[in-house]
Amino acid sequence: MEPLAIKARNLDVDFEVFSDRRASLKSRFIERGATGRSTVSALRDVSFDVREGETVGVVGLNGSGKSTLLSAVAGVLPLTNGELLVSDEPRLMGVGAALLGEASGLRNIRLGCLALGMTKREVDAQVDALVEFTELGDAIHRPLKTYSSGMRARVQFVVATAIKPRILLIDEALGVGDKDFREKSRNKVEEIIRSAGTLMMVNHSLAELRTFCKRGIWLVEGRVVMDGQIDEVIEAYEKS
């Protein structure tokens, strides 16, 4: 049996919601009742193990906690309760990363790679290949705010795939760009998965989950309701 890559025990993630968005920070702390403050439980008592080399797809309706779970495993969101242990630093690959509209596509690629922990030397060595992968040509030097959504997706994707981690978390990062670029990006993700070893993936395309994953976890309102073979989990999810 392979050693554990991820160990999650009784994970809870709560968010505070305020009905009066205009309320000042001072009033939110002092007059909490007046602002309509409430707590939303995004994850509830979630426990699972992922062993090295496992590929796990997470399914569930919108708002079920899928993206929250991956963000918690990546350390992006703090836990309200529970214990989370990982054998190596997980890398969250998503296309919703914040980019700088005033900066060029090239500048965003450089800054994004540095934010992932790459050294300047590593960025310099890879940046030409990353730019070539986007197929944006001279547009790579234009401000990002002039890009179409498809062009932005290409920049986001090459930043997200610039590294090859041992624990890879993918949140809806395969369906970007046009048909040709989606095929190209899919091949890139397959290459990363082969080197990463351990994968957790969220994707609304159940076909993609079947392709990449052998195991499935089904979330309903932040709780795990099924954990098993991916085909069995997807079949139960579709019937529901």
Image (cartoon, rainbow, N blue to C red):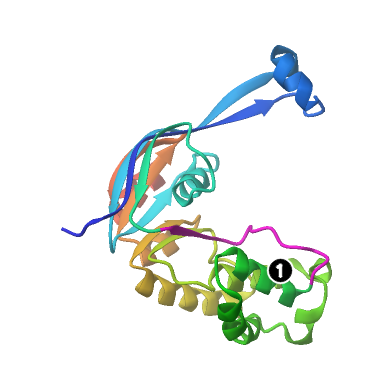
Q: Position of residue 28 (x, y in %)?
A: 73, 21
Magenta: predominant secondary structure element? loop
For image coordinates 64% across by 67% down, the residue present is: 112
Residue 20 visible from this viewpoint: no
Task: Classify 85 as above or below 23.
Answer: below
In this view, 56 is above or below 129 = above
The x, y position of residue 122, in whole percent, is 55, 79
**Magenta residue check for 42:** no
* Residue 35, above or below 9: above
**53 horizontally vs 169: left or right:** left
* Res. 26 image quadrant: top right
Q: What residue is pinned by disc 1?
A: 152
User: Of residues 10 and 149, which is closer to you in this image?
Assistant: 10
Residue 150, horizontal then vertical, whole percent: 70, 70
Check residue 96 for magenta coloring. Answer: yes
Q: Which residue is drawn at 56% across and 67% down?
A: 160
Please state if 234 lies on the left or on the right of 133 as rendered: left
**How many neighbours does mark 1 have within 10 angstroms: few (below 14), some (14-19), or many (20 or more)?**
many
| Relative height, residue 216 to residue 127 (above, below) | above
On the question of residue 147 being in view, the answer is yes
Q: Which residue is at 47% across, 78% downward?
A: 187
**Magenta residues?**
89-103
Quadrant where the image shows the N terminus: bottom left
Residues 225 and 125: in front is: 125
Residue type beneath disc 1? Arg
- Judge left or right: residue 118 versus residue 223: right
Q: In which quarter of the image is the C terminus?
A: top left
The image quarter containing residue 45 is: top left
What element does badge 1 sit on?
Answer: helix
Q: Please state which of residues 238 and 66 is positioned toward the viewer in this rendering.
A: 66
Residue 77 x, y percent position in the rendering: 53, 43
